[in-house]
Image (cartoon, rainbow, N blue to C red):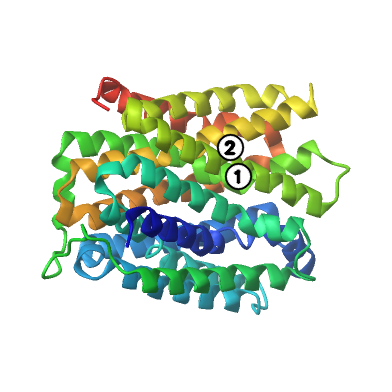
Amino acid sequence: MPVRVAVTCIVVAELLGTSLWFSANAVADALHRVWGITTIELGYLTSSVQLGFISGTFLIAFSGLADRFSASRTFAICAVLGAIANTAFAAADGLSSALALRFLTGVALAGVYPIGMKLVVSWAPERAGNVLGWLVGMLTLGTGLPHLVRGLSITPNWQGVIHTASALAIAAAVLVWWLGDGPHHTSRRRLEWGGVLATYRIPGFRSAAFGYFGHMWELYAFWAMVPLLVAELFTRQSANSIYLAAFFVFAAGAVGCIMGGAISRHVGSARIAIIALAGSASCCLLYPWLPQASTAAAFALLLLWGLFVVADSPQFSALASRACPKERIGSALALMNSIGFGITVLSIQVATASWQGISANIAWLLLPGPVLGLIAMRRLWSATP
């Protein structure tokens, strides 16, 4: 199969499969009416997915599962399991059961995102920065898909938004199962508990990983807060209009990932990551001053922030995958994801707990992430493209 066709299949599957991630956030107002959840409890729902993802990635990283079995089969099975847990969420009768189901959805996503990265690199290792830009771009768009479904009133009720995300994940599983693994796919003959820790002795991998950790303090907390930031700007708009506007912020991130991936072929992944971190830090610094001055300017900066906030993510993965041995790529990326998503749980809780008191000033709580990421990446600016 032509590499371009295979890469297209994988990134489309990533788009569809990751629609599970923020499906609950896209129906937050409905959950408030039905269950009476608060902004802080919405943060709990989001963090449950993150905790599930952390648990799943930690398991596959430390056990070596990510590098022991077929990446395409692992992806497909996990996408189906995630769809089942997500569908069950639509039938939950309250916050307690919903938290458990969102946790299970996160565990399943651990076999979709990092395994998807290994799968796409197995088809085009020489263009890792570019193809991972497309992959993470589609992940970003996928996390925003439920907001689009909600904003366009495609389904008559909030359960329909959830079921649509599950159906998309099933389609992703079918597509990847049919595609199979790439010609550069490698696997270990046996499980290797803890062997992945050796990758952190590699300076290049360590710099990419710590840059990624700073980036993750900001990214998912920002995504969780997007509907609230948009609602604060457009107070007279309907809920559907607010979710549609939120989708465009996610879409801007997809554009940033794809553009960054294309440009990285000429200037290198490290420079793209550093530029994106600097742009994101600037948006964090400036945003709190704009909402009261100009709604149009604030939304424009929100779109720009959406573009920068995730454009560096695929480049961190590209740098990390180049730095570590091929037989450990899946485990190394999974462990990096696990630690990074652990950081997001804290930042999401801090952001949602602080929202009522500081609203738009929440941006300044996210600012330390990209700043620390820049410090970790400073030695890589001169890296060869």
Amino acid marked by disc 2: Gly
**Which residue is rendered at x = 62% and y = 22% of the image?**
286
Please give the residue where the numbered disc 2 appears in the rendered image.
306
Q: Position of residue 133 (x, y in %)?
A: 42, 43
Seen as rendered, the residue at the extreme front is 2
The secondary structure type at the circle numbered 1 is: helix
Task: Give SS at disc 2.
Answer: helix
User: Where is residue 382 drawn, in percent x and y?
Assistant: 26, 20
Quadrant of res 376:
top left
Marks 2 and 1: CB-CB under 8 Å?
yes
Q: Quadrant of residue 370?
A: top left
What is the number of the mark on residue 91?
A: none
Quadrant for residue 383, please give it.
top left
Residue 277 image position (x, y, % from top left): 45, 28
Residue denoted by label 1 = 251
Q: Nearer the viewer, residue 216 or 16?
A: 16
Q: Residue at x 60, y 45 (%)?
A: 250
Viewer-closest of 333 and 365: 333
